[in-house]
Image: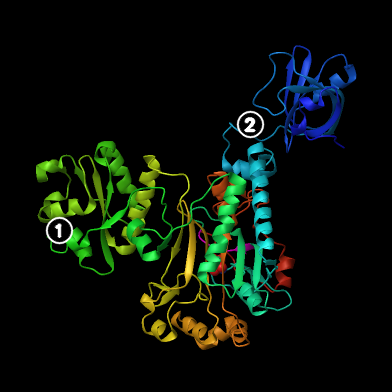
Amino acid sequence: MRSHYCGEVNESLVDQEVTLCGWVHRRRDHGGVIFLDLRDRDGVAQVVYDPDTNEVFQLAEQIRDEFVVKVTGRVRLRPDGKANADMSTGKVEVLGKQLEILSTAKTPPFQLDEFVQVGEDVRLRYRYMDLRRPEMLNKLRFRSKVTSYIRNFLDSNGFMDVETPILTRATPEGARDYLVPSRTHEGSFFALPQSPQLFKQLLMMSGVDRYYQIAKCFRDEDLRADRQPEFTQVDIETSFLSEDEIMSITERLVRDMFRDLLEVELPEFPRMPFAEAMNRYGSDKPDLRIPLELVDVGDLLTNVSFNVFSGPANDPKSRVAALRLPKGGELLSRKQIDDYTKFVGIYGAKGLPYIKVNEKAKGLEGLQSPIVKHIADVIDQLLERVGAEDGDIIFFGTDKTRVVNEALGALRVKLGHDLNLLEKQWAPLWVVDFPMFEEDGEGGWTAIHHPFTAPSCAVEMLESDPENALSRAYDMVLNGTELGGGSVRIHDSDMQETVLRILGIGQEEAQEKFGFLLDALKFGCPPHGGLAFGLDRLVMLMTGAQSIREVIAFPKTQSAMCMMTQAPGKVDPRQLRELNIRLRKTEQPE
Ligand code: ASP
């Protein structure tokens, strides 16, 4: 129908006739002349109708915003002084000769101009309108560039794109499964994959050697933070490569892509052991753009009479750490300190002790703090340990290690953003040497990655000291966001059975759930390993979007529903009967 996209209309077409199709972005009447800003996915072109073309002019008068029209006219330069330097088409306009209304439109639920702030619920309900906004379409377009870049890179490095099932058995990645009842097998359920993990490992056993898939994954999680119940992974698996080789090839993918799509030269990714990341940053995905660090001070405080410090200082499962904010004593008001105290409360911290260093040379006199009198004996050592200078504020975390790390880790990031402390735009790294397991709070263990991750020790050591066993896992982190994670896998059935046993999965259960994997491991399994990138997060970071919902065409809300289709929805009783499902009556409050 069209001869050009709106965005293509420029001086090179002057005096030519063009036919454009698109949405009327705006209609303006100017003293007997009608201007239509016509929009399609490539841009906006200005079309002018003057009353000389009477019939067409009358039609143009009926046009409203978001009508879909076909326009034919001649391109001409805009009159002197009327050019718009902000538009690629701003030097020209189309003098309309013909006009066809292809579709009318009701008044839009919101203005599409980018500067109009609209509630997200409304945007999601009318997502097809929201996506018409050029900034949203541009994100989709960029996402498409990213996926095609990744495909090209992996294709040219010998990776094979293989699809794996969506209707399958549980693949444990630490979330709840989405279940799908089977009609043909009464009482049985499929699970939607939390990841293609086991299938990609089986593909290595099949000899595929290098696999990738841009795969939908499903996790029924409490949607804290910025998660989606279904999301996309760039899923990768390789045979006969060491972790160094896997990290190197996937790092190259990301660095090449940043260079080619964003013109950003990322530095070589440093590697940091998990323990160091937790110690210095309180996080296994440290944001290295922020120059603040946690410092352990527990050893100085074991003998002070102040139990808030000495208690955790003497407990091996606790930690006392300090976070020094240079010049923070001068920068932060009392109110801000109170707000930060509330903030760390979210992470379970019972308070946020602090010392303001007004004038170090004056000793205790020069310090301002509700706690300093309790720790007077060790204060000099403490100030020296954290490198305190006049004007600083030192915050403390003193609690179970997990609470301290989460609270001070989050505070570190918040201070970094609130006070504009970011030292660079991009800070990538690999976090390595993760522990295999963490306590599940009920006396057992859970896998830090997934149960198929290989330990870096032998079976005997793993069994005798699971707490201290490290894994051959690695996470790629960018600006405090985990971009991807993976590991070398277990390729030996004894080791796999041992790990499942440590996780409290008995032989019978193991056979029932993962029998196919345990069998396959006995039929000749290559050493293998891989990684998966979170595509949504990657695109979010690359486009500077604030949320993954901004880079997903049809995302779900924080409560895991689709505002537009109203999914999940009720189903017909007949469908339930076919599935042998009877719903329990929800109790009505009296
Ligand atoms: N399956 C893992 C995940 O979804 C990634 C991997 O180990 O390759 O996080």
Residue at 65% across, 61% down: 154
Q: Is residue 228 magenta?
A: no
- Quadrant in the rendering for residue 271: bottom left
The image position of residue 389, as x and y in percent, is 21, 43
In the figure, is residue 488 to the left or right of 21? Answer: left
Q: Amino acid at mark 2?
A: Asp
Image quadrant in which the N terminus is located: top right
Q: Which residues are magenta?
A: 216-222
Q: Is residue 312 above or below residue 559?
A: below
Residue beneath disc 2? 113
Residue beneath disc 1? 306
The image position of residue 81, as x and y in percent, is 68, 14
In the figure, is residue 294 to the left or right of 582? Answer: left
Residue at 59% across, 56% down: 535
Reading the chain from its start, which is encountered first: label 1 or label 2? 2
Residue at 61% across, 64% down: 235
Please tell me whether mark 1 sits on a helix, a strand or a loop: loop
Mark 1 Cβ inside 8 Å of ligand 1 = no
